[in-house]
Amino acid sequence: MPAKKILLTPQVADEICNYLIGGAYEHVAAEAAGVPYEIYQRWIAQGDKSLSGKFGGKKTVYRDLALRVRKAKATARLLAETEMREKHPQAWLKCGPGREQPNRPGWSKEVAPVIVEDHRQINILASVEWSKLWDLISQALEEFPAAKLAIAQVLLQHEKGGEPPGPLLIANEAETLPIGQKGE
C-alpha cells in the first residue's frame, strides 16, 4: 500500500504557525501538525526558492508557508522577549537586545575605565571629584571630630609629598591614644 500523500493545506499551515507562535521548535510544530519533518523541510526549501526568485518569483503555497513561518517565528521571539523584559528586566538588559555586541556598547559588560597615558602628574586631591567626595566624608564625620582631624592630617601630609609623622593621635576626654589602639 503506497504511503499517504501529505498535502499542504491552509489548515495545516495554520496549525504549524500556531504551534510556532506558541514557542514550539519547527520540527515539533511540523510533527504535531501531522507532517513529517523531512516533508516540512522540503516545503520550506521550495518556498525559500520561490522567495529568492528561482521560480520566477511566482506565488506558491510553499512561498506563502515560508513567509508565514518566518512571521510566526518572529512573533514567538517577540512574545518571549517582551515577557522577559516585563518579568526579568535586568536579565533582559544583559541577555536581550541591549546586551554588549561588537561595535555596540550594551548593558552586559562593565565599562572599562579610559586610561590615558600622557605622562602628566595629576594631583587627585585638587580634582572636582575629590572635592565632592571630601564634602561627603566631612559630613559623615561631623560627629567624629577627632577622626575628621586625623584624616585631614594624613591628606595634608600626603599632599606635601611626605609620610605622616609617626602615629596619629586622637584626643579623647580621658586620654590621647594612637589611632587603632584602645584604652585599658
Image: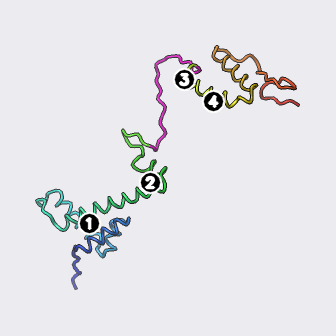
- Mark 3–mark 1 Cα distance, whole angstroms, equals 65 Å
Residue lying at 41% horizontally and 56% vertically, measured from the top left: 82
Give amino acid for label 1.
Gln
Residue count near mark 2 (Cα–Cα under 10 Å), binned few <14, some 14–19, many ≥20: some
Q: Are marks 2 and 1 in contact (CB under 8 Å)?
A: no
The foreground one among 55 and 90 is: 90
Q: Badge 2 is on which residue?
A: 85
**Disc marking residue 41:** 1
Residues marked 1 and 4 touching at CB (< 8 Å): no
Instruction: Give the residue pinned by disc 3.
Output: 128
Residue 120: % across, % down: 50, 16
Which of marks 4 and 2 precedes in the sequence? 2
Q: Secondary structure at mark 1?
A: helix
Q: Is residue 175 left or right of residue 25?
A: right
Distance between the Cα atoms at labels 2 and 1? 32 Å
Measured from the top left, where is residue 35 in percent x and y?
A: 28, 74
Type of amino acid under label 4: Leu
